[in-house]
Image (cartoon, grey):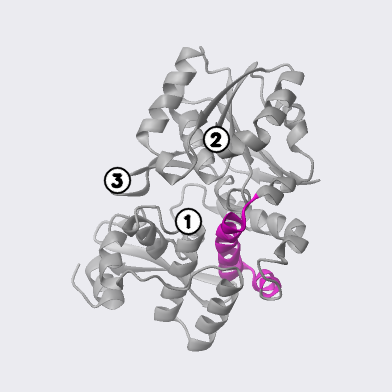
Amino acid sequence: MKTITVHASQTYPIWIGRGLLGQCGTYLKQQTKAQTAAVITDDHVDRYYGDIVTKSLEENGFRTIKFVFPHGEASKCSKTLNQIYDFLCENNITRTDCLVALGGGVVGDITGFAAATYLRGLDYLQIPTSLLAQVDSSVGGKTAIDLTGGKNLVGAFKQPVAVLCDLDTLHTLPQLFLADGMGEVIKYGMIRDEKLFTLLEQHTLETISEVMDEIVPTCIDIKRDVVEHDEFDTGERMILNFGHTLGHAVESYYHYETYTHGSAVAAGMCMMTKATCTPELYVRLCDCVKAYDLPTEVDAPVAELVPLCGNDKKRASASLRFIVCETIGRAEIRSMPFTEFAAWMGGVDA
């Protein structure tokens, strides 16, 4: 097992290893004085891991309750959030109790937001079970739900008491969701680590599991470093959004149904790189993206995607901030008046 410690407004460990899920109660007991643990998960993850986690928590003295909601991005909404609040209230959860987010990015985001806001805040443990959640969304304390107008528009910064990444959970991921996570992994190579990117170029979706024990800690360590320098996303942390400005627009355009988050980010990275970098770098990125069954573009007209970027949380007044990687391993934050960005990318007025 490897431990990476995050030193943010709250210091906490990230445990990375195999066979950790059945010991989650032991690990959580080290980080909280809570006596009741409310497990929040979705119906897919619950079938695989709900009983294992509940058993471990109970064996370590936690009174354990569980709330299960339908899987998918559509559940990351105010309706589900209010159902979680009602569940916590009905079960007499207090500020001295804790939540356990068991699942992928949707579960982690909405559980974290519930932990940040219910009774003005209580402890929560992240147990990410998807590659995307392990390398990205479970680390750093960003929590949110979606609105009709855009992704992650209502949220709060809330650091977990710990993150437990059991790499064995990745074995149960369908190829589609393994590819989804690889979109974020490729992003980390592009923004900060050329060596990681080169490693990814040497593999495909069929062989990448051979080096997952190296990839996951590498990505987490990159994010830890960025978060420690800019916890509240006012400067350097924005580089983590490479590919996301257009990626979120793609998700919104297709109503969160056609493209997974990682797929949309992959397309967003390629579209931005095509517009800002050399043809050679664009081809290299596209080749890497294709090796993991991810898209390099989408059918939606750019002229229709660009206006959706205006709803993105990275917009600052009349300007839009976006990320460019002219060199693999180095990211740059740029800002442009939104009307200029719209004309530059889509050839239309905003």
Q: Which amino acid type is shown beneath numbered disc 2?
A: Asp
> Which quadrant is home to the N terminus?
top right
Label 1 or label 2, whichever comes before in sequence order:
2
- The question of residue 162 being in magenta is answered with no
The numbered mark, 3 or 2, whose residue comes first in the sequence reads: 2
| Circle nearer the viewer, 1 or 2 | 2
Quarter holding residue 274: bottom left
Question: For the residues marked 1 and 2, what is the alpha-carbon distance in whole angstroms?
Answer: 19 Å
Q: Amino acid at mark 3?
A: Thr
Q: Please give the name of the residue rendered at 53% of the width and 87% of the height, measured from the top-left corner.
A: 280
Characterize the local packing of mark 2: few (<14), some (14-19) or many (20 or more) Cα atoms within 10 angstroms: some
Q: Which residues are magenta?
A: 173-200
Residue 181 x/y as whole percent: 58, 57
Residue at x 52%, y 39% (from the top left corner)? 107
Front-most of 247 and 67?
Answer: 67
Q: CA distance from mark 3 to mark 1?
A: 16 Å
Residue at 46% across, 51% down? 233
Residue 195 appears in the figure: yes
Image x and y of residue 171, in percent:
71, 50
Q: Nearer the viewer, mark 3 or mark 2?
A: 2
Label of residue 148 in the image: 3
Quarter of the figure with the C terminus: bottom left
- Identify whether 25 is placed above or below 315: above
Report which residue position mark 1 lands on.
261
| Secondary element type, mark 3 | loop
Q: Is residue 10 visible?
A: no
Q: Quadrant of residue 103?
A: top right
In the structure shown, which secondary structural element does the residue marked by tag 2 occupy?
Answer: helix
Left or right, 349 with respect to 277, comes to: left
Left-right relation of 342 to 187: left
Q: Is residue 151 above or below residue 81?
A: below
List the residue tagged with mark 2.
Answer: 43
